[in-house]
Amino acid sequence: MQAGPGRRTRGRRGLLISALAVIGLVASACGGDDADSSSSASGSGGDGGGDLGTLKVVTVVPNSLLFIGVQAAEQLGTWEGTGLTVEVVEGTSPTAGQIMASGEADIGLMDGNRAAANIAQGLDATIMATCISPWSQYYIASNESGAESVEDLEGGTFGTTGEGSAGHFSAYKLAEEMGWSEDEWTATPLGNLEGLRAALTSGSIDAFAWSSTTAFNLEAMGEGVVLDSARDYVGPNVFEAFADERAEALRVFFEGYFEAIERIQDDPQLAIDILVDEWDVNPEAAEKAVEADVPNLSTTGEITDEELEGLAEAVSFATGGEAPDPDSLYEYWQDALEG
C-alpha cells in the first residue's frame, strides 16, 4: 500500500496500547504470540499493599523513553510497596495484538493506531489511557539519500515495521501533506527496528519514522539524519494504551505509572540517567529525547475528542475500511474503574 473523552464500557480485561502521537492504555481479554515475545521482570510492588498478583505488559520495542514508566519500573519504583508485580513481554507492532489475543499479556503498550485497528477487527479490548499526546515520531533519513529536509524524500522509499503501522501512517500523512501521488513514494515493510536500522545504514531505504530516543541516537552515531517531527503532519492522534479485569490491580497499575511520569517530569535527569546508564543511549541523544518527549508524557491518560477523531482516521488507514465510531475505542481508566 502506498500510501471531553469518550465514554463506553467494555467488559473483561485490560490492554495498554501505544501509538505515535497520543499514547493510550487499552483494556482487553488476552495476550499473544510467543514466537515474537519473551518475558522479563519489569518491577515488583513488594510486600506493602497486599498481594495483587502479576500483570503482564506487552511492549512493541525495548528500552523506549515513551514506555519508561513500565520498562524502568525497578529504577523508578513505579509499583514499589503496592503488592503488584508487573512483567514485560517483548513484542513488535505487528505481533502485540496477537500476544494479547492469545492471553499471554494482560496489558498492551503498542501503536495506538494498530491497537485501535485490532479492536475494530475483533480484539476484545478498550483503550483506557494515553501515554503521550503529540505524535512522537521523527523522520530519520539515510545518509545515502542526501536528504536535508522532508521535501527531499519525494520519490523515496520509507521503511515500516508493517502495513498500517504507526511509521507507515507517519509516511502516509507526510505524503498527503506534501501532495505526493502514490507513485512518488513507497512504503516497504521490514518487521522491526533492527531491520529498519540495517536498511537505513545500507541505503536500501531512504527514511523511516520512529520515536525520539532512536532517532537522535542514530543521528549521534552517524547512521542517519533527523529531518523533522511527524507531529504536525499527523495531527491530533493516539500513540500508546493499557488495561485488565482485576479492577484493584489495574487501579494500582495506572496510579503507579502516572506517578512515575510525574517524578520524571519533576526531575528529567532521572530519565536521562536511565537512558544513558541502563540503555546505552548516547548522552547528547538522551538529553534531546528527554527534552522533546518528557514534557508531553501524559500524567492522567485522558484522551480528547479531537485525538479520538484522529485515531479513527488512522484505523481506517490501517484496515482499509470505514472509520469506526471513536467512542467505541475508548473508556477512560478512572471511569472504567469506578466502584
Image (tube, grey):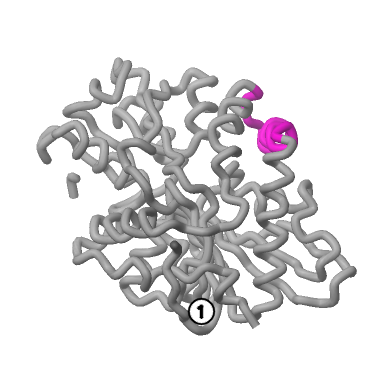
Tell me the quarter of the image containing the C terminus: bottom right
Q: Is residue 90 left or right of residue 80?
A: left
Q: Is residue 253 magenta?
A: no
Where residue 24 appears, x then y in whole percent? 49, 58
Vertical arrangement, residue 300 with respect to residue 175, above or below: below
The residue most toward the right is 48
Q: Residue at x 30, y 46 (%)?
A: 168
Q: Quadrant of residue 313?
A: bottom left
Q: Quadrant of residue 121?
A: bottom left
Where residue 309 appears, x then y in whole percent? 32, 58
According to the image, label 1 marks what residue? 29
Q: Is residue 278 magenta?
A: yes
Q: Residue at x 62, y 78 (%)?
A: 338
Q: Residue at x 72, y 39 (%)?
A: 266
- SS assignment for the magenta stretch, majority: helix
Where residue 298 appears, x then y in whole percent? 57, 50
Q: Residue at x 30, y 15 (%)?
A: 146
Under circle 1, the secondary element is: loop
Q: Is residue 269 left or right of residue 209?
A: right
Vertical arrangement, residue 307 with respect to residue 119, above or below: above
Where residue 233 appears, x then y in whole percent? 30, 37
Residue 278 visible in the current orientation: no
Q: What is the three-letter code of the residue carrying label 1?
A: Ala
User: How many discs appear?
Assistant: 1
Q: Residues within 10 Å of mark 1 (few under 14, many from 20)?
A: many
Q: Nearer the viewer, residue 129 or 73?
A: 129
* Residue interval drawn in magenta: 268-283
Q: Is residue 318 left or right of residue 209?
A: left
Residue 119 visible in the current orientation: yes
Q: Nearer the viewer, residue 36 or 312?
A: 312
